[in-house]
Structures are given as structure tokens and as C-alpha cells.
Image (tube, helix red, strand yellow):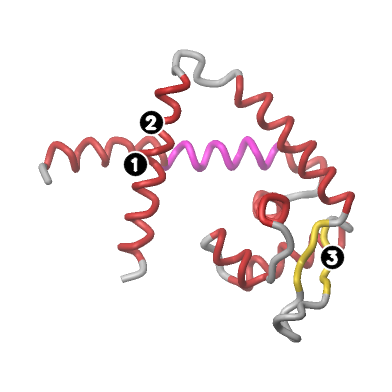
Amino acid sequence: MSADRGSALYGVLRQVRPLVLNSARMVEAALRPRGLSVGMRAVLEVLAEHGPATVPAVADRLDLARQGVQRHVDDLIGLGYVTPRPNPAHRRSALITLTGTGADVFHELRDEELRHLAAMAPECTPAEISTAATVLRALNRDVRERSTR
């Protein structure tokens, strides 16, 4: 592998860092009126996309500590957006399930986010956006792998 390739990928990562921070701020501002945090929204998304799951399974999917996800789940239970259900596979680890209200709130949020995103980066073609996603997925995979060594 060449130093030029490393420099090019470093350039991508330099763009990702502020993007992550600024997008979190943008999402946080949109969530605040609903009493949600970025972490709570992430838990709702996992449950909406993958169905009921244990807290450890959600934490693994999000690459977050189980304790932090548990706090988000507890807050979401308090809002009535998720509920714990018995887990036939593990007596002590409940399955966390979206409530109807939680599903509705998540889908409203997601629709609003997609409307806003559709107006961003108008100079980029769908193919360029797809290529960017491919590169970022590969970088995420490899960075995650190296961080767990």
C-alpha cells in the first residue's frame, strides 16, 4: 500500500470527524423538543430496523457500552417508547420492544431527517454518494478491527 493511499484515506477521516460532531449537534437539536437524546434515537433505530433485542445485543450493534445503552433504554421506558418483554432464550435479559408510540415517533423523526438530508450536498450524484458510503463502510470495518486488537 502506498503513502499516497494512506494520505487520501486520512483526508477522508479528517472530513468525517467534524461531520460526526456537527451531525450529532443537528440531530440533537431536532430531538430536544421530544425529550430524546442522540443515544436514545440510536436505540429506537436499532429496534425499528431489527426488532426486539436485549440491551447487550443493541449495545453490540451500536458499538457502545452496555451500561450506556441501559440508561437510554431506561429513559425510553419512562417515555413509553419501549417496553421490556420476557426473553424465552434468557430469563435474566429481557427483550426490549418498541411500543406503538415509540415506532410512530421514530418513523416521524426518520421521515423528517430524510427530508432534510435530501436537500444536502446537491452537487453530488447518487453514484458519488454510493461510493462515499462504500468507502466509509470499509474504513469503519477496518478501524473497528484494529481498535479491538
- The disc, 3 or 1, on the residue closer to the chain's N-terminal end is 1
Measuring from the top left, give residue 9's x and y in whole percent: 26, 40
The residue positioned 35% from the left and 47% from the top of the image is 138
- The disc, 2 or 3, on the residue closer to the chain's N-terminal end is 3
Task: Say which residue label 1 marks.
Answer: 13
State how far apart marks 2 and 1 are (Cα). Answer: 15 Å
Picture quadrant of residue 69: bottom right
Task: Say which residue label 2 marks.
Answer: 131
Task: Say which residue label 3 marks.
Answer: 83
Circle 2 Cα neighbour tier, 10 Å, few/some/many (<14 / 14–19 / ≥20): few
Q: Which mark is residue 64?
A: none
Is residue 27 in the magenta section?
yes
Q: 74 or 48: which is nearer to us? A: 48
Q: 47 or 5: which is nearer to us? A: 47
Q: Which residues are magenta?
A: 17-29
Measuring from the top left, give residue 26's x and y in whole percent: 63, 35
Circle 1 Cα neighbour tier, 10 Å, few/some/many (<14 / 14–19 / ≥20): some
Left or right position of 142 against 105: left
